[in-house]
């Protein structure tokens, strides 16, 4: 609900909001430009009487002196029957330049206030300001929900791409945008009578004045008592009329000054409502607060970027979440598909199932498991398609499913089927799917079909499951889906470094280049890799196609596209088809591969520490993160191997990174050394420092074998106990990330 409240108004109003933001950013320059062009004496240095005397010396025909909100002093005068206006130096009274309002800024102001549509446009601008208030508030709440609490708003955000850009910019700009939107809404509501506008009735013209010989303006007492910083406007009396007076307006009120005696007449302070109104105008425009205007202008410039990234996120979510025009409403659907996915792979299978059921005449509602409704009044079938994250955990789109299931009120006629996705080489293969199946049964729902588990996104197993389900529902389901990319890229091995043979743990660092026919890799592929490979970062996955048509195996990348190579670290597994295949390669040999993005495994940016933990070949992406740490943010590596003499992977590189401070600290453990230590032991020895870093907002990234990751998790749990938090809390905040195998 909150996401829709934020997203739908933004999509509908994006063009108008961008117009308001861009014009607002341009207008925000005006106060700073006025300030830069003006001479602004220090407070208490020049009185209004002194200013007026100096101006009159240079402009005998002075009719009015105005001090703008940014401090610029303008004199309006008459000379030889011609009216004029000049910007003047209040210290000397000299003219600086002719004054004329900018036609460009006037046009921009009309576009900003009314879209050049008079009152209709002003009403539309007011509505857009209210929409911006809604977007700011809902956006803040979404950020709080995403980061895990208000305090987490000040920590680096996880992730990358459009979501990361959108979140970081929103956090930076939201207060400025909210201030502009609130004040704009207030002013618009006043203009159209929704809110009362303070009535400012000036003082009545004095019934009696001295009528004596006018004194020089520089000697008038009432003007001598007013500092220039307080002045708003001084209107001179009509020439040769002793009964006329000076009209004085200051920041605090207005009145009249006798031109002969210098006495202040009929002074009336400004009402509280008028003062408040002026503050609202200043906060909205930056007038009188030029520095605030620049801040609001910079904040406004984020709106076009937020609009683009917001639309991108919406489109990606629409594509990946199965939200299509034929997606039935939850209350009207007779069939419901709930999807749990970490990297969106499961959504492809869900879309095929939905399309097949729709073709068969069912009204299907498809949504993520986190969005499970508390009731599906017309549904007779519930399909749950879910992957498993990490060591048997729920994937990102299903982490709230169990809590929502407790409040679910299912009809007795509702039957369910669970389809799990995973990899059988992991000990807890499809564990979360198994837990979901049991939980649904305990809820009292009947099984439509026994739980089925799909190994490594097998298209044939998915098709077989569809045939079985089709028989149970009496409708054939032709489920055909191959999630693999249709055309892998040829990759050529250009370099390899071998370690670990002496300790029976052969591990190789392999560096590939993409093969482009008729074009060189260095001059044509990078950075223009888009025609063959998408841009990639360390932590993304290289899918390698083994020989004989086997399913691909995925290896974490230790390089980024800007490094010029695709670098992976591979340990040869006993009986491992793909690892053995890779270890047999020699420079010049070629393989087929493709990139799969893994944005959920990225180090946070900013000055908070990043703790990298790994063992064996898991050091690959961690080294890639260190290599990219060119800003020298605090980054600590805990890594375990067998022997410092045989399999100290990346030893020369890590030494260089320590020297140039891309790596802040390195702590290694070797199980076949005299110390016989594991990475978990090093963490325990360093627990005080680790605890302090976590307490300061540190992020932890773990990469390597599943057993190692489980041991590390237990050690971190023990270290966190004095902090009254745990790994799951850090995981929810994006501060504990795993890439395990």
Image (tube, grey):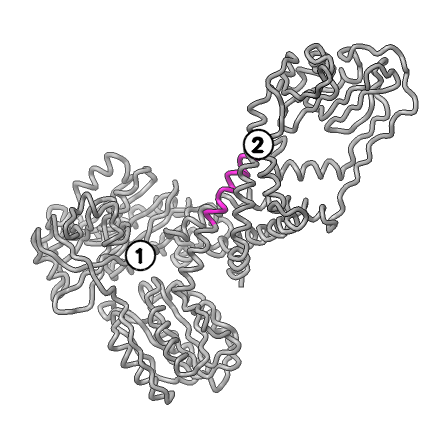
For mark 1, does the 10 Å Cα neighbourhood hold few (<14), some (14 to 19), or many (20 or more) residues? many
Q: Nearer the viewer, residue 431 or 555?
A: 555
Query: Percent position (x, y) of residue 461?
Result: 26, 77
Element carrying mark 1: loop
Q: In the displayed structure, would residue 350 be above or below residue 186? A: below
Q: Tell me if I can see residue 422 in this picture.
A: yes
Disc 1 from disc 2: Cα separation: 45 Å
Element carrying mark 2: helix
Look at the magenta stretch and give its main secondary structure: helix
Q: Is residue 297 magenta?
A: yes
> Quadrant of the image for the C terminus?
bottom left
User: Residue placed at 59% from the left, 33% from the top?
Assistant: 103
Q: Is residue 446 magenta?
A: no
Q: Nearer the viewer, residue 384 or 614?
A: 384
Query: Percent position (x, y) of residue 189?
Result: 69, 49
Please tell me how many numbered marks the rendered image carries.
2
Query: Percent position (x, y) of residue 739?
Result: 28, 57
Label at residue 30:
2
Q: In the displayed structure, would residue 602 be above or below residue 230? A: below
The residue segment tinted magenta is 292-306
Is 694 situated left or right of 671 in this image? right
Can you identify the residue that label 1 sits on?
A: 598
Is 675 situated left or right of 317 in this image? left
Are the residues at dot 1 and dot 2 in contact (C-beta closer than 8 Å)? no
Query: Percent position (x, y) of residue 34?
Result: 58, 27
- Occupied quadrant, residue 111: top right
- Name the N-terminal-most of marks 1 and 2: 2
User: Residue placed at 24% from the left, 38% from the top?
Assistant: 657
Is 111 situated left or right of 477 in this image? right
> Which is more foreground, mark 1 or mark 2?
2
């Amino acid at each position: 609900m909150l996401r829709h409240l934020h997203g739908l108004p933004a999509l509908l109003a994006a063009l108008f909001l961008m117009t308001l933001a861009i014009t607002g950013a341009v207008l925000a320059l005006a106060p700073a430009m006025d300030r830069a062009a003006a001479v602004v004496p220090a407070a208490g240095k020049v009185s209004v009487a002194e200013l007026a005397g100096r101006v009159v010396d240079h402009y005998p025909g002075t009719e009015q002196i105005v001090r703008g909100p940014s401090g610029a002093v303008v004199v309006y005068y008459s000379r030889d029957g011609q009216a004029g206006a000049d910007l003047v130096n209040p210290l000397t009274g000299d003219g600086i330049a002719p004054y004329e309002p900018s036609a460009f800024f006037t046009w921009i102001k009309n576009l900003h206030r009314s879209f050049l549509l008079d009152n209709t446009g002003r009403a539309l601008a007011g509505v857009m300001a209210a929409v911006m208030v809604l977007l700011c508030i809902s956006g803040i709440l979404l950020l709080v929900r995403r980061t895990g609490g208000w305090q987490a708003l000040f920590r680096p955000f996880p992730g990358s791409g459009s979501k990361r850009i959108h979140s970081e910019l929103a956090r930076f700009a939201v207060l400025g945008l909210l201030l502009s939107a609130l004040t704009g809404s207030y002013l618009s509501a006043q203009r159209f009578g929704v809110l009362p506008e303070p009535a400012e009735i000036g003082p009545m013209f004095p019934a009696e004045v001295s009528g004596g010989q006018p004194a020089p303006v520089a000697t008038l007492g009432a003007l001598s008592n007013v500092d220039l910083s307080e002045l708003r406007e001084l209107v001179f009396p009509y020439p040769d009329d002793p009964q006329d007076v000076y009209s004085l307006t200051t920041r605090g009120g207005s009145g009249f000054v006798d031109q002969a005696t210098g006495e202040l007449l009929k002074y009336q302070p400004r009402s509280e409502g008028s003062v408040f109104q002026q503050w609202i105008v200043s906060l909205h425009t930056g007038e009188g607060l030029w520095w605030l205007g620049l801040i609001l202008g910079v904040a406004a410039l984020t709106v076009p970027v937020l609009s683009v990234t917001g639309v991108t996120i919406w489109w990606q979510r629409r594509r990946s979440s199965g939200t299509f025009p034929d997606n039935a409403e939850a209350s009207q659907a007779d069939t419901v598909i709930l999807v749990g996915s970490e990297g969106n792979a499961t959504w492809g299978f869900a879309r095929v199932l939905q399309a097949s059921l729709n073709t068969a005449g069912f009204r299907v509602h498809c949504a993520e498991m986190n969005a499970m409704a508390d009731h599906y009044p017309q549904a007779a079938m519930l399909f749950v398609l879910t992957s498993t994250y990490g060591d048997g955990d729920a994937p990102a789109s299903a982490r709230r499913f169990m809590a929502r299931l407790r409040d679910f009120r299912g009809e007795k006629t509702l039957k369910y089927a669970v389809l799990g996705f995973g990899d059988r080489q992991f000990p807890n293969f499809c564990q979360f799917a198994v837990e979901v199946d049991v939980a649904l049964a305990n809820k009292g729902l009947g099984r439509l079909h026994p739980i089925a588990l799909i190994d490594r996104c097998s298209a044939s197993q998915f098709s077989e499951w569809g045939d079985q389900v089709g028989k149970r529902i009496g409708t054939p389901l032709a489920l055909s889906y191959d999630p693999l990319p249709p055309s892998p890229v040829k990759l050529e091995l250009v370099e390899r470094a071998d370690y670990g043979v002496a300790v029976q743990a052969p591990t190789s660092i392999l560096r590939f280049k993409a093969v482009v026919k008729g074009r060189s890799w260095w001059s044509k592929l990078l950075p223009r890799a888009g025609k063959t490979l998408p841009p990639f970062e360390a932590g993304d996955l290289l899918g390698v196609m083994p020989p004989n048509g086997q399913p691909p195996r995925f290896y974490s990348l230790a390089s980024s596209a800007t490094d010029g190579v695709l670098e992976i670290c591979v340990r040869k597994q006993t009986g491992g088809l793909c690892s053995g295949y890779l270890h047999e390669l020699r420079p010049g040999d070629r393989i087929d591969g493709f990139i799969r993005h893994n944005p959920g495994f990225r180090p946070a940016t900013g000055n908070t520490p990043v703790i990298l933990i790994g063992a064996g070949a898991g050091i690959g992406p961690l080294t890639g993160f260190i290599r990219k740490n060119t800003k020298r943010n605090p980054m600590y590596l805990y890594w375990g191997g067998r022997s410092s003499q045989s399999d100290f992977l990346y030893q020369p590189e890590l030494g260089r990174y320590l020297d140039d401070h891309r790596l802040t600290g390195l702590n290694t453990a070797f199980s076949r050394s005299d110390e016989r230590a594991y990475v978990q032991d090093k963490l325990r020895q360093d627990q005080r420092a680790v605890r302090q870093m976590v307490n300061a907002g540190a992020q932890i990234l773990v990469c390597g074998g599943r057993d190692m990751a489980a041991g590390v998790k237990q050690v971190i749990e023990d270290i966190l106990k004095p902090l009254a938090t745990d790994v799951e809390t850090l995981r929810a905040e994006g501060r504990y990330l795993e890439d395990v195998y």
